[in-house]
Image (cartoon, rainbow, N blue to C red):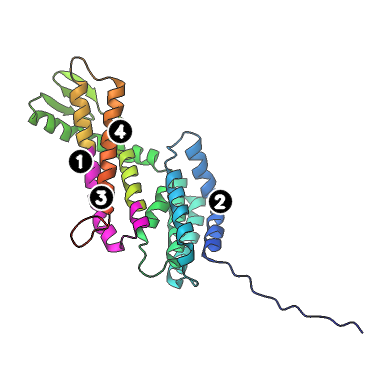
């Protein structure tokens, strides 16, 4: 008679990171589309920075994630996943990918400990998508008109003859076109990326993040108008402005906007000094 030893079956435990990875893999079609769009030149590959920032945050936070997810957020994630799957078959790729990103954001929210802000992480998930070209297409022209109008006012206040015509300006009799890079779309993307990343890594509370987010938009608008005003004023001179100085001034203003954004999103002590 042969004796048999029974080996008890042990349940396989999949942690939060594993479930999130499986959920992300389920959106392989949306991911492949986003990767193609970022790598073939159709859009700026800025989303890679958001992916890296989100991955680093999740790796650092892995030991503190909940053992059991919140069912309400998990149900919302499941509903968004179903809608995103249907949208992938019926709607344009970008809206479908945005729904998939929101589904992943809801899934991440289900595992977060009490008190951890969800909005900055959802922002990073959305910013991981190839958004810049679409934002430029839909918002670029209105932003260029806005920038040109306020730049004309500032130049007039400085004593120069300036007026706007469409997305172009006439300064001292010289026509200067406010082109797509001057719309501020890329500056806005970088500023909101900085805002979400800083808020996530310093642990800014949800309410404070949401209250300060409009200030980021205001900083971007003011920074872009000042950048355009300075560049147009210098370009309209008889000697013009060299490409090197044009790039340097634009980069300097971008750095100022990012620094101010980080300042806006930095936690404050009681005395108002950044922690």
Numbered tag placed on residue 263 in the rendering:
3
Disc 3 to disc 4, how far (Cα)? 18 Å
Q: Residue at x 22, y 27 (%)?
A: 231
Which of pointers 2 and 3 lies earlier in the amino acid sequence? 2
Q: Is residue 96 above or below residue 2?
A: above
Residue count near mark 3 (Cα–Cα under 10 Å), binned few <14, some 14–19, many ≥20: some
Residue 32 vertical placement versus 265 (above, below): above
Q: Position of residue 264 (x, y in %)?
A: 24, 51
User: Magenta stretch mostly in which secondary structure?
Assistant: helix
- Is the residue under label 4 in contact with that under label 3 (CB below 8 Å)? no
Name which residue lies at 47% across and 33% down: 41
Q: Is residue 6 above or below residue 183?
A: below
Q: Can I make out residue 169 in this image? A: no
Label for residue 28?
2
Q: What secondary structure is found at the residue carrying circle 4? A: helix
Q: How many marks?
A: 4
């Amino acid at each position: 008679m042969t004796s048999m030893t029974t080996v008890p079956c042990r349940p396989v435990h999949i942690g939060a990171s594993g479930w999130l990875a499986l959920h992300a893999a389920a959106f392989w079609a949306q991911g492949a589309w986003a990767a193609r769009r970022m790598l073939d030149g159709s859009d700026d590959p800025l989303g890679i920075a958001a992916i890296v920032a989100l991955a680093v945050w999740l790796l650092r936070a892995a030991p503190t994630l909940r053992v059991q997810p919140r069912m309400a957020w998990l149900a919302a994630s499941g509903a968004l996943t179903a809608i995103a799957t249907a949208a992938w078959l019926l709607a344009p790729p970008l809206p479908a990918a945005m729904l998939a990103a929101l589904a992943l954001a809801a899934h991440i929210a289900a595992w977060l400990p009490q008190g951890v802000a969800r909005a900055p992480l959802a922002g990073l998930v959305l910013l991981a998508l190839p958004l810049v070209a679409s934002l430029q297409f839909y918002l670029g022209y209105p932003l260029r008109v806005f920038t040109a109008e306020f730049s004309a006012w500032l130049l007039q206040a400085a004593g120069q003859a300036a007026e706007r015509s469409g997305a172009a300006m006439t300064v001292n009799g010289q026509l200067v076109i406010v082109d797509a890079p001057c719309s501020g779309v890329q500056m806005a993307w970088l500023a909101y990326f900085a805002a979400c990343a800083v808020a996530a890594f310093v642990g800014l509370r949800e309410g404070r993040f949401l209250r300060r987010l409009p200030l980021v938009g205001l900083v971007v608008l003011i920074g872009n108008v000042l950048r355009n005003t300075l560049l147009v004023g210098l370009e309209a001179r008889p000697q013009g402005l060299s490409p090197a100085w044009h790039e340097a001034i634009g980069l300097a203003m971008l750095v100022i906007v990012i620094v101010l954004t980080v300042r806006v999103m930095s936690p404050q002590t009681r005395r108002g000094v950044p922690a």
